Amino acid sequence: MVMGVRQFEKLFRLAAGLDIDKSDIKRLDDFVNERLHDLLLMAQRMAKMNGRDVITEADVPLTKGLQESMQQFKEMDEELSASDILAHLAKLPALDLAIGEDVEAMLPELAGGITVSLAKVFKVLDPEMKNPQTEHWERVEQIYAILV
């Protein structure tokens, strides 16, 4: 997993006042991995367009909202392991380019930012939500597929 169960629970609670249960953990882990992979695919495209063979931080497409969620994550004082994240990304289709050290270093903040943004999107979908259900997950996956 990209992060421990307690970390996922804590981030969801702090970011949006949501509770997640054990059935949400695998779904959440997969979601974060897939969004990270999507961002790296777009970063790879940018690096190739600029004639580089290594993906750098400047290649990673960071929206204002994702940057704000990454900042919120940093303020929560949670630590994630870049090596654990890379191990999980290795299970997805391989990238054509190497990931630079600067990108590796930012992976924990990216994963944390994606998690925080996800919790906030759930709350926007239903301000009264306490625990995301399958229908909420499906809607959020559709939203992120359109946006990321």
Image (tube, grey):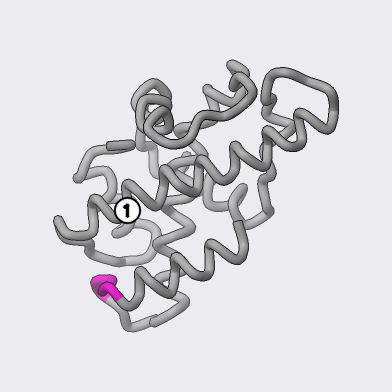
Could you say where residue 132 lies in the image, as x and y percent from the top left?
A: 28, 71
In the displayed structure image, the side of residue 16 where residue 22 appears, left or right: left
Q: Quadrant of the N terminus?
A: top left
Residue farthest right in this picture: 50
Residue 98's place in the image compared with 71, above or below, is above
Q: Is residue 80 visible?
A: no
In the rendered structure, does residue 22 fall within the stretch colored magenta? no
Q: Residue drawn at (37%, 32%), measured in percent from left and top? A: 91
Residue 61's place in the image compared with 129, above or below, is above
Q: Residue drawn at (27%, 43%), measured in percent from left and top? A: 7
Q: Nearer the viewer, residue 25 or 128?
A: 25
Badge count:
1
Q: Quadrant of the C terminus?
A: bottom right
Could you say where residue 49 lies in the image, as x and y percent from the top left?
A: 83, 33
Q: Nearer the viewer, residue 63 or 138?
A: 138
In magenta, the rendered stretch is: 130-134
Q: Nearer the viewer, residue 96 or 27?
A: 96
Q: Residue drawn at (39%, 59%), measured in percent from left and top? A: 15
Could you say where residue 32 lies in the image, as x and y percent from the top left?
A: 41, 47
Kind of residue at badge 1: Leu
Q: Residue drawn at (43%, 74%), measured in percent from left and top? A: 139
In the displayed structure image, the side of residue 32 where residue 26 appears, left or right: left
Could you say where residue 89 lies in the image, as x and y percent from the top left?
A: 42, 32
Q: Is residue 73 visible?
A: yes
Mark 1 residue crowding within 10 angstroms, few (<14) / some (14–19) / many (20+): some
Residue 110's place in the image compared with 68, above or below, is above
Q: Judging from the image, what secondary structure is the residue with disc 1 in?
A: helix
Q: Which residue position holds label 1?
A: 28
In the displayed structure image, the side of residue 29 where residue 100 appears, left or right: right
Can you tell which quarter of the image residue 141 is in?
bottom left
Dominant secondary-structure state across the stretch colored magenta: loop
Can you tell which quarter of the image residue 87 is in?
top left
